[in-house]
Image (tube, grey):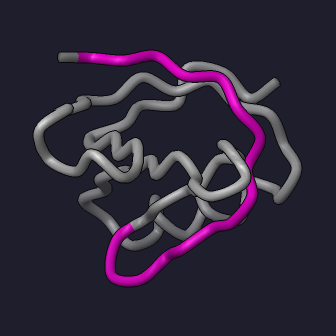
């Protein structure tokens, strides 16, 4: 199932793949994983995203994968707000 989420970037993780953690509840965050073929595209994307920036993404969500956190994979940035 695909899910669209709007949120604020709380943390950026670049290695081994790109993951943006969006602010969620007090105990959990929303994990958004992005796939890139080329390192230069990965670097450009990560440097363009800023902590505190609001974004909208759509990604694949599997409710059976992990019930303790929201994990979206194969995310696509819809809009940097």
Residue at 20% x, 32% y: name it: 63
Span colored in magenta: 2-17
Farthest residue in the bottom direction? 15
Residue at 38% x, 73% y: name it: 39
Residue at 36% x, 18% y: name it: 3
In the displayed structure, would residue 10 be above or below residue 17? above
In the displayed structure, would residue 27 be above or below residue 56? below
Residue 45: name its quadrant. Answer: bottom right
How many badges with numbers are in the image? 0
Q: Residue 70 at x, y = what percent?
A: 40, 42
Q: Is residue 5 magenta?
A: yes
Residue at 74% x, 29% y: name it: 80
Please tell me which residue lies in front, 18 or 21.
Answer: 21
Q: Residue 2 at x, y = what percent?
A: 26, 17
Farthest residue in the left direction? 64
Q: Residue 79 at x, y = what percent?
A: 66, 21
Q: Left or right of 56: which side holds 49?
A: right
Q: State whether the magenta stretch is mostly helix, strand or loop.
A: strand
Q: Quadrant of the N terminus?
A: top left
Residue 28: name its quadrant. Answer: bottom right
Q: Quadrant of the C terminus?
A: top right
Q: Residue 8 at x, y = what percent?
A: 77, 40
In the displayed structure, would residue 54 be above or below residue 47? above
């Amino acid at each position: 199932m695909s899910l669209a989420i709007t949120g604020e970037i709380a943390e950026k993780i670049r290695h081994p793949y790109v993951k943006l953690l969006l602010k969620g509840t007090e105990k959990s965050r929303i994990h958004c994983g992005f796939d890139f073929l080329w390192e230069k595209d990965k670097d450009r994307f990560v440097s363009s995203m800023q902590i505190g920036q609001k974004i909208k993404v759509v990604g694949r969500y599997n409710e059976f994968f992990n019930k303790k956190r929201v994990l979206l994979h194969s995310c696509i940035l819809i809009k940097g707000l």
